[in-house]
Amino acid sequence: MIRKLALTCCALALSLAAAELAVRLLLPQASSWLAIYRTHPELPIFSVDADLERFVDTGESAWTVYTDGTGSRTAAPDRRPARTREDALWVIGDSFTFGNGVDHEQTFVGLLDAAAGPAGSFVNCGTPGYGPRQYLLRLTHRLAHEPPPRAVLVCCYLGNDFQDTLWDKPVDPGEGKSTEPPSLKGLLKRSSHLYRLTSKVWHRVRPTREDRVWRELFSATAWEGPFLSRAAERFGEAMGAVVGACRASAVPLVIALVPPEYTVRGATAGDSDRDPALPVERATALLAELEVEVVDLTPALGAVGADDAYWPLDGHLSPAGHRAVADALAPLLVELVAGGTDAQSSPR
């Protein structure tokens, strides 16, 4: 009996090992965590740790994270140009701004920084997991403690920035981040591609709250419901406060709208209630009331194509997607960082 049980356990272990190897080779699964976080030393939110060097290999992409003394993503120490804080343009956003999946030099912030040359610098203040309320906290804190920048760019990823205004963002980075207590689940998340694939399939069969609401972003009916209508209100309030903070400090502001991949694809699959453009349309309407410069990046990413602009598994912008964003923003922002015109005069 014991021998039979032992043989069964060995067979199961070998089968799991074989399945793990097959998934790693044929369907590598991006990890859902990054060991780069800390609790912000002064604000009630998490933030990216300072002075980091972390190599990340998701199976789909391999990249290295370097940060400076403030937790802003940057180039490796030996490749950082010597520039002052007064010549900077701050870029605030979430993981799409931070550049999950690519090296610093491939991010649109890094590309804009290279294009600016000695005339100025672009500082990547993006933090994976942030939303509009955290953008505001990060902006006002920096304005209060550092010399004002030449301009600010806030990048809103519309795949979750509406929802992020209502979902809690804990002080502790939480599950899946570097402060997660040791557990079997945490070990599997970090090491097993089979676990990640199984988890992904499970969530497709039984969608999480985040998956369900993400799909509702493209439903006109859902936007009339209590959750998204309240999220839109909170989004408008948070972005209005961002505009107000920049105006109070006489700092030019540009807001860029990063569309979900589904928006760029533009496919409705015959569903009359599903409109891929809805998130961008709702955000544009709310921001139009604030009289601020708004750049919709949908045409730029559409010109590249969704298959090339986004990582197929991870879902973040690929190097080609970052290049398209940088090319779309460069004509306006490089002029601003060099001391050009005020960007808040009119929306477009």
Image: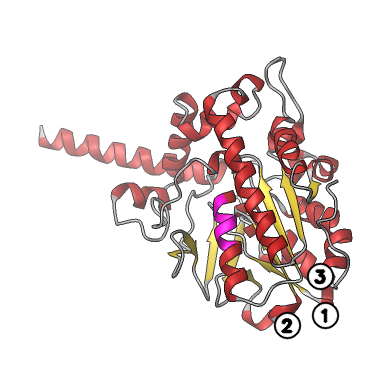
Q: Which of the 4 image quadrants contains residue 245? A: bottom right
Q: Residue at x 49, y 69 (%)?
A: 49
**In the image, what residue type sits under mark 1?**
Pro
**In the image, what residue type sits under mark 2?**
Arg
Kindly identify which residue carries mark 1. Answer: 118
Residue at mark 2 to residue at mark 3: CA–CA distance: 13 Å
Count of numbered marks: 3
The mark nearer the N terminus, 2 or 3, is: 2
The mark nearer the N terminus, 3 or 1, is: 1
Q: Residue at x 83, y 47 (%)?
A: 347
Q: Do the residues under discs 1 and 2 have CB atoms within 8 angstroms?
A: yes
Kindly identify which residue carries mark 2. Answer: 83
Is the stretch drawn in magenta largely helix, strand or loop? helix
Kindly identify which residue carries mark 3. Answer: 337
**In the image, what residue type sits under mark 3?**
Val
Residue at mark 1 to residue at mark 2: CA–CA distance: 8 Å
In magenta, the rendered stretch is: 133-138
Residue found at the far left of this picture: 1
Q: Nearer the viewer, mark 3 or mark 1?
A: 3
Apparent side of residue 162 relative to residue 21 in the rendered image (left or right): right
Element at label 2 = loop
* Label 2 CA crowd tier, 10 Å (few <14, some 14–19, many 20+): few
As for residue 147 lying within the magenta part, the answer is no
Is residue 131 visible in this depiction of the protein? no
Apparent side of residue 16 relative to residue 272 in the rendered image (left or right): left
Image quadrant holding the N terminus, namely: top left
Give the percent coordinates (x, y) of residue 69: 55, 78
